[in-house]
Image: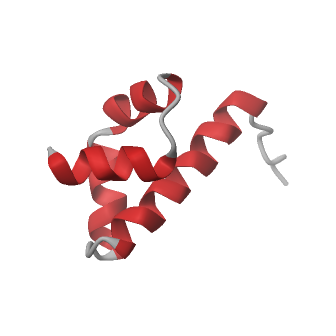
Amino acid sequence: MAKKEKLDPETEALINWCIEVEGHLVAGGATVAQAQDYIEEQVEWFTDLFYDGLTPEEAAQKAFEG
């Protein structure tokens, strides 16, 4: 049986942050599938926003403005 790969804390924080962004996108009117697809398509942009210190809510707002 393969071991589950352990993520480093930074990667885990980014993933959790994206999950929160997804929730804000859904609350703003996107479907879960649309939110997930958008985050996957724009992963580099969202990663930059994460490292720039934006909250998930702020990142979702920028996505709606874009």
Q: Residue at x 40, y 46 (%)?
A: 58
Looking at the picture, tell me which residue is in the foreground, 3 or 12.
12
Q: Residue at x 37, y 60 (%)?
A: 36
The location of residue 41, given as percent across then percent down, is 26, 44
Q: List the single residue furthest toward the left.
A: 66
Q: Residue at x 54, y 58 (%)?
A: 20
- Residue 59 horizontal side relative to residue 11, left or right: left
The location of residue 34, given as percent across then percent down, is 26, 67
The location of residue 3, given as percent across then percent down, is 84, 46
- Residue 36 horizontal side relative to residue 62, left or right: right
Looking at the picture, tell me which residue is in the foreground, 20 or 5.
20
Q: Residue at x 54, y 57 (%)?
A: 19
Residue 26 sits above or below residue 45 on the image = below
Q: Quadrant of residue 64?
A: bottom left
Looking at the picture, tell me which residue is in the foreground, 11 or 27.
27
Q: How is the image coloured?
A: secondary structure
Quadrant placement of the C terminus? top left
Total numbered labels = 0
- Residue 49 horizontal side relative to residue 14, left or right: left
Quadrant placement of the N terminus? bottom right
Looking at the picture, tell me which residue is in the foreground, 24 or 8.
24
The location of residue 33, given as percent across then percent down, is 32, 71
